[in-house]
Image (cartoon, rainbow, N blue to C red):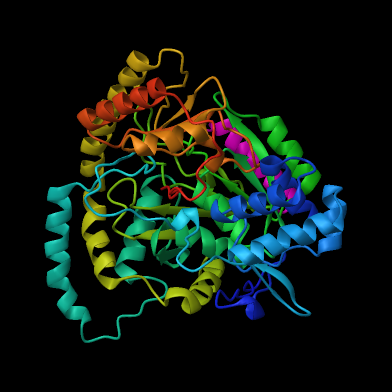
Amino acid sequence: MAGMGSVHSLGGVAGSSRTLGSRQLATLVAATAGERPGYRALAQGVRSLLLDGRIPLHTRLPAERELAGALAVSRATVTAAYDLLREGGYAMSRRGAGTWTELPAGQRPANVASFPDGADTIDLAMAAPAAPEAEYAEALALAGARLTGHLRTPGYHPLGLPELRAAVAERYTRRGLPTLPDQILVTTGAQQALSLVMGLLGRPGDRVLVESPSYANGLDAIRYAGLRMTPVPVTDEGWDGELMECALRQTAPRLAYLIPDFHNPTGALMGPEQRARLLRSARATGTWLLVDETMAEMALDVPAPAPLASLARHGEGEQVVTVGSLSKTHWGGLRIGWVRASSRLITELAATRIHRDMASSVLDQLVAIELLPGMDEVLVARLAQMRERRAALADALTSHFPEWRWQLPPGGLTLWVDLGRPIAGALCDAALAHGVRLQGGARFAADPGTHEHRLRLPYCMPPDVTREAVRRLAATLSAGLPTAPRDLDRPHWVA
């Protein structure tokens, strides 16, 4: 089993250990700036990738000679491009240490953008519903009363409150996967869970098999950890099991990051036979399966699937790490997620989270303890609400955009819409001016430059808000899309 991953300093280049390979950067730049870019296009390409979050901050760029060879351009072209990046504040150099990515003062990467309060913008980039208010208010009141008993303690629980770990374990057991509390680590949301697992089990340069498209923030966590992605496609028909098995055999990746339950963004659901074959293939190649189950209980038209690990035969389940949260079933503002794995791995993960955030909020955990026993009742109302909202979005799209195509997913929170032409980026830019925030398919792509003909459209808003958003989209297209380059500083934050 792997030990702890190395710590990356974000305070400056001196403590950073991330280096971007020349071929890796050349591939990324080629998708945005052309195969043999001039120095201005090369600088703009690196800037675009940095603002889009596809190149992490404080990452060492390739040496000028290496990148020139990979791009088949002169070294002078690369030198001039690096000079432009330094002048603009997007890179810094230190003698003997190379050139590193940076951001100018006041600039943010796209994936941490925020919005002014009260803006009249309909946010269709967030696949997360509002909280069930009555249930949440009751849970908060009960949790507040119980908090008094914790005020006499330090309040740090790196593994999570024992009662919450037991409640999550009991939920897994009820879903068909016998689980002990020692197999649960409570995290600050599923995103932290993903980052902790990738940081512990992976090393910079290790291969990770990923779906393409996939959850954007999961892909970002892989990039940040310095891991190399091996994409396998998820289409409107789902997964190609033979292709996935072939990719596992040929690359023997260290990890595979998968969303088999109402896949984000496509909504696809992996069948039981395919899951069993995946478990056998991963066992044969020694690949850890990191299974993202944050959408698993958002089952709209079919029964909620059993956890993938419940299908594991003897010896296969030890390589499965499952991540979940309350963000989709309850509320994203309740930052409660978890990891389900072997007791040994849970102990190692708890040790790695100490230097990050020490522990999750006690109050949030107490609220979660109150919510979990009534989860089935909450889901009955939540799922009925999502079916109504899915129908409203589908009807509005059919009315305004009969040429667009999508598959109605059996669960999850999003439609993966085919626009018929590669206009997603331009549409997202133009729609923001009409009061709608969207996220194009490229944000969910493992390979740069792909899925530009797709939009991920959540159905988490009330029907009247959804219909207004689609009406604004129609007005955006009627006004015409801009032909100028995309506004790379627009917000790209998704959930």
Above-or-below relation of 346 to 439? below
Q: Is residue 90 visible?
A: no
Q: Is residue 203 magenta?
A: no
Query: Which residue shows up at 83% across the image and 58% down it?
Result: 76
Asked whether 168 or 415 is in front, the reply is 415
**Looking at the rendering, which quadrant does residue 142 occupy?**
bottom left
Q: Is residue 277 magenta?
A: yes
Query: Which residue shows up at 36% across the image and 70% down it?
Result: 360
Q: Main secondary structure of the magenta part?
A: helix
Q: Is residue 466 visible?
A: yes
Picture coordinates of residue 376, whole percent (x, y): 25, 43
Badge count? 0
Picture coordinates of residue 134, whole percent (x, y): 12, 49
Above-or-below relation of 308 to 207? above
Query: Which residue shows up at 39% across the image and 34% down it?
Result: 431
Query: Which residue shows up at 73% across the image and 53% down it?
Result: 25
Task: Give the position of the N terminus as an image quadrant.
Answer: bottom right
Picture coordinates of residue 90, whole percent (x, y): 60, 63
Above-or-below relation of 234 to 49? above
Which residue range is magenta in the image?
269-286
Picture coordinates of residue 280, whole percent (x, y): 68, 43
**Looking at the rendering, which quadrant does residue 5 occupy?**
bottom right
402 on left or right of 271: left
Asked whether 89 or 8 is in front, the reply is 89
Above-or-below relation of 98 to 117? below
74 on left or right of 402: right
324 on left or right of 248: left
**Looking at the rendering, which quadrant does residue 379 occupy?**
top left
